[in-house]
Image (tube, helix red, strand yellow):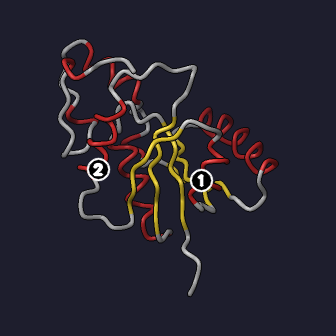
């Protein structure tokens, strides 16, 4: 039996945006399985509870057998080894994203040569969307629905820092 091509899509996804959804959906034909993994970052304080984020992403990909949603609190490269992922999937919006992600990708490659980082460019109409901007819209009572997948409806009352 052929080995499965497993990709890990790591991030804080606080919240998960239409840009994130687009990257995952466009990557689905490339991989047998995509693990969307919410990482715990000691430098970031979660705006939305982890359980909410996991639930929202599960709702977006309901019925998609290729997608699994998890969380982790270790080096991403170590989590890849733990779950058998041979690829790290990342979306790139800007040249600044590329510089940042390239440094992480090269570091991961030094730590584990058997795991490749795969970059997908975001669609041009999603380039400006960041979780930070979406959080600010929500925090101040704005309508963030244009930036969120259809199955995610959020209001500021759902925020509770992790």
Residue 143 lies, with reference to residue 28, above or below; the image says above
Q: Are marks 1 and 2 in contact (CB under 8 Å)?
A: no
Q: Badge 2: how crowded within 10 Å, few (<14), some, or many (20+)? A: some
| Residue drawn where x is 63% and y is 40% of the image | 98
Q: CA distance from mark 1 to mark 2?
A: 20 Å
Asked which secondary structure carries label 2, the reply is helix
The mark found on residue 58 in the picture is 2
Quadrant position of residue 118: bottom right
Residue 104 lies, with reference to residue 66, above or below; the image says above
Asked which secondary structure carries label 1, the reply is strand
Residue 5 lies, in percent from the top left, at 56, 70
Q: Is residue 21 left or right of residue 117?
A: left
Quadrant including the C terminus: top left
Q: Residue furthest right?
A: 110
Residue 18 lies, in percent from the top left, at 32, 43
| Residue drawn where x is 56% and y is 87% of the image | 1
User: Label 1: which residue?
Assistant: 88
Q: Is residue 84 left or right of residue 33?
A: right
Quadrant position of residue 64: bottom left
Q: How many marks?
A: 2
Residue 37 lies, in percent from the top left, at 47, 46
Quadrant position of residue 142: top left
């Amino acid at each position: 039996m052929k080995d499965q091509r497993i990709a890990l899509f790591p991030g804080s996804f606080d919240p998960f945006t239409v840009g994130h959804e687009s990257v995952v959906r466009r990557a689905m034909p490339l991989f047998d399985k995509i693990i969307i993994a919410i990482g715990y970052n000691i430098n970031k304080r979660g705006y939305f509870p982890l359980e909410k984020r996991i639930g929202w992403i599960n709702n977006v990909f309901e019925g998609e057998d290729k997608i699994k949603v998890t969380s982790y609190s270790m080096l991403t490269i170590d989590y890849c080894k733990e779950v058998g992922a041979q690829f790290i999937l990342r979306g790139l919006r800007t040249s600044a994203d590329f510089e940042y992600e390239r440094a992480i990708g090269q570091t991961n490659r030094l730590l584990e040569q058997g795991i490749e980082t795969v970059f997908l460019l975001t669609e041009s109409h999603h380039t400006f969307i960041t979780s930070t901007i979406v959080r600010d819209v929500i925090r101040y009572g704005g309508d963030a629905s244009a930036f969120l997948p259809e199955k995610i409806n959020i209001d500021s009352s759902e925020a509770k820092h992790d």
